[in-house]
Amino acid sequence: MPVDYKKEIQFGTEARTELMKGINTLADAVVCTLGPNGRNVLIDNSGYNELNKPTHTKDGVTVAKNITVDGLVPNLGAQMVKQAALKTADKAGDGTTTSTLLARELVKAGLQHLNNGENAVEIKRNIDEAVKEIVTVITENISKEISNEEQLQQIATISANNDIEIGKLISAAIEKVGQDGVVHIEESKSGDTYLETVEGMQFDRGYKSHFFVTNNGDMTCTLDNPYVLIADHKFTQVKDLLPILEGVSNANKSLLIIADDIDGEALATLIVNKARGILKVAAVKAPDFGDRKKLILEDIAALTGATVFDKDKGMKLDKFSYDWFGEARTVTVSKEQTTIVDGKGSEETINSRVSDLQKQIDQENTPYIVEHLQNRLAKMIGGVSIIHVGGYTETEMREKKDRVDDALHATKAALQAGIVPGGGAALLYASNGLQNDNLGSSIVKEACRKPFTQILTNAG
């Protein structure tokens, strides 16, 4: 039978009005969380399954993710602004509520001028020019680098809704592993929130398929106490994986596969096993290329206690051995990165590899090779800071975990790009620096003043 797709076609003022309805619905729910006295939002999760409990949050992007507006056209408007919030979260990790507010104000003012007969192309061009001016004023005249640990802690504390405990933990976590180090957030097994530093590594490769995701909220895959298979080999056929999968299944373990590549029916088999609940698994493409890839795979093997499968060494897949597997306490895989926490490699092996890398750095004169060796060494010795987030109830723990995540991203962004006065003051000041006197500039100027006034409104 033919499928009856519902279509709704609208034009002009009618369409713009409906889009604005959806934008306002989403923005109203999000912007009430802005500022130190912003409201908490309670989210009902009962529609997903009976085990999901309500969530309360002050995180704008969490609110935005959970909103779908009635009506096809209004929902399109809401989804557009939601994408702005998600993009901000992806790039900066914080500031999602402000980006939602700015998006709403820009669209609202723009539509008003369109309805008055102004030229849309001209308005858009002027807005783009004004935004560039604002960014230039902020980066050149307002932004300052973080100069001490106290400022670092203050940024983390403010971003965690003025929670001093979280601010101290994040500051300490970054101090332990460095600005470019790995800080991981986990749920505490107790009600306490505390910091732990362990051996670990992060590399820039994500999962081969989103079907491996176990946490839909942040689109990551988490494996507890997994086996780690490292292979300088491209898996394409099921028969190559069968001995390995049987070994994992017999041990009742989860599995991380890091391989030259995993494709075709081999990848499909892993996805099906994961979907049916037969096996908790994630597949990741090996980082880097050529000889560098081989060396990094050996680094990961040292940290996890694995043996790299390599046909060049005479190894055969049908001669599978449990000795090939490494292990780790936790592995987290996102779309772009893999983090291995507390690998079970022997201290002697790790120290030996670190020593070899240090000797190579001392003896090497080629700058780009030295840089590569230093990066490998940093990953080997940097470790991972783990912030264990606890709470007396699951709802409290989730809310606190969201705040820790926000504060961590905001602090790392501040380390990279600098800090500005809060409370909407930076945008307010920057808006006074706009030179052009046109519709686009006036729209941007008014939008940049809105966060300041919204924070005052939320404060009562």
Image (spheres, rainbow, N blue to C red):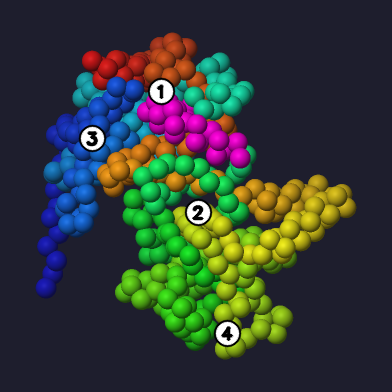
> What residue is disc 4 on?
320
Disc 2 designates what residue? 336
Label 4 amino acid?
Phe
Task: Check disc 4: other Cα within 10 Å, few if <14, some if 14-19, many if 20+.
Answer: some
Give the residue at mark 1. 126
In the image, the segment drawn in magenta is 155-176
Q: Which amino acid type is shown beneath numbered disc 1? A: Asn
N-terminal-most mark, 2 or 1: 1
On screen, residue 354 versus residue 34, left or right, reads right
Which residue is rendered at x = 75% and y = 53% of the image? 373
Q: Are marks 4 and 1 in contact (CB under 8 Å)?
A: no
- Name which quarter of the figure residue 351 lies in: bottom right
Q: Residues within 10 Å of mark 3 (few under 14, many from 20)?
A: some
Q: Residues within 10 Å of mark 1 (few under 14, many from 20)?
A: many
Residue plotted at (13% across, 69% down):
2
- Residue 41's tag is 3
Mark 3 and mark 2: Cα distance apart in space:
30 Å
